[in-house]
Image (cartoon, grey):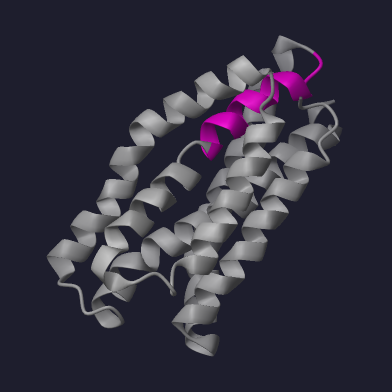
């Protein structure tokens, strides 16, 4: 039964944790750039949208790399660590070249979802289980997006900008740990 399949749940939790950090940062980044860094609102919006533009080819390239490696787990772990590094350095990066930080964010974050969803095929026992397995991952996908702004906003209110970004780093690492302990995903 798919609902009892730990491997599917590990993929779902990987997805959820990844999105809590990724979407929390992404949702608040334009505000951070305007309030803290003094960047014009139009420029802040344009800069953050560049991460998504980078994500178009990055998602495909990450898929190609995973196929050539014969592993989804290894790229997921590497990207989780890369996400954590980007989140931790977000408040430290100089404003004069901040667009580089946003491009690094796009590279680190935009290949993860494809790996998570494609991992489902390895976690299930038969193709007939695919729909419910993907539905479980998708449910956690939306839970992660829902929690992201609430958590980041709460952290921002309680601890300030820097700590909110810093706390996203261990959440990204936890995402990678759930990928690591997933025995059925290569």
Magenta segment includes 138? no
Q: Residue furthest top?
A: 127
Q: Is residue 132 visible?
A: no
| Image side of residue 183 versus residue 12, left or right | right
Q: Position of residue 141 (x, y in %)?
A: 56, 45
Tell me which segment is drawn in magenta: 112-125
Residue 12, above or below 28: above
Residue drawn 33% across the image and 48% down it: 51
Residue drawn 51% across the image and 19% down it: 64
Q: Is residue 34 visible?
A: yes
Q: Where, by quadrant of the figure, is residue 39 drawn?
A: bottom left
Report the front residue among 141 and 172: 172
Q: Position of residue 83 (x, y in %)?
A: 54, 53
Magenta segment includes 120? yes
Q: Which quadrant holds the N terminus? A: top right
Residue 71, above or below 39: above
Q: Which quadrant holds the C terminus? A: top right
| Image side of residue 19 versus residue 78, left or right | left
Residue drawn 52% across the image and 76% down it: 164
Count of marks overlaid on the render: 0
Q: Position of residue 181 (x, y in %)?
A: 83, 41
Q: Position of residue 162 (x, y in %)?
A: 49, 80
Magenta span: predominant SS is helix
Residue drawn 41% across the image and 33% down it: 58
């Amino acid at each position: 039964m798919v609902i009892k399949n730990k491997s599917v749940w590990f993929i779902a939790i990987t997805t959820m944790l990844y999105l809590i950090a990724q979407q929390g940062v992404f949702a608040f980044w334009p505000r951070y750039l305007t309030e803290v860094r003094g960047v014009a609102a139009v420029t802040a919006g344009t800069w953050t949208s560049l991460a998504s533009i980078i994500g178009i080819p990055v998602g495909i390239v990450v898929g190609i790399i995973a196929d050539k490696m014969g592993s989804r787990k290894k790229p997921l772990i590497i990207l989780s660590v890369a996400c954590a590094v980007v989140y931790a350095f977000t408040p430290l990066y100089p404003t004069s070249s901040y667009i580089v930080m946003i491009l690094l964010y796009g590279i680190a974050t935009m290949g993860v979802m494809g790996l998570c969803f494609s991992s489902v095929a390895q976690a299930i026992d038969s193709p007939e289980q695919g729909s419910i397995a993907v539905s479980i991952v998708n449910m956690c996908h939306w839970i992660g997006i829902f929690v992201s702004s609430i958590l980041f906003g709460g952290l921002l209110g309680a601890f300030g900008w820097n700590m909110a970004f810093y706390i996203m780093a261990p959440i990204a690492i936890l995402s990678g740990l759930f990928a690591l302990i997933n025995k059925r995903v290569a």
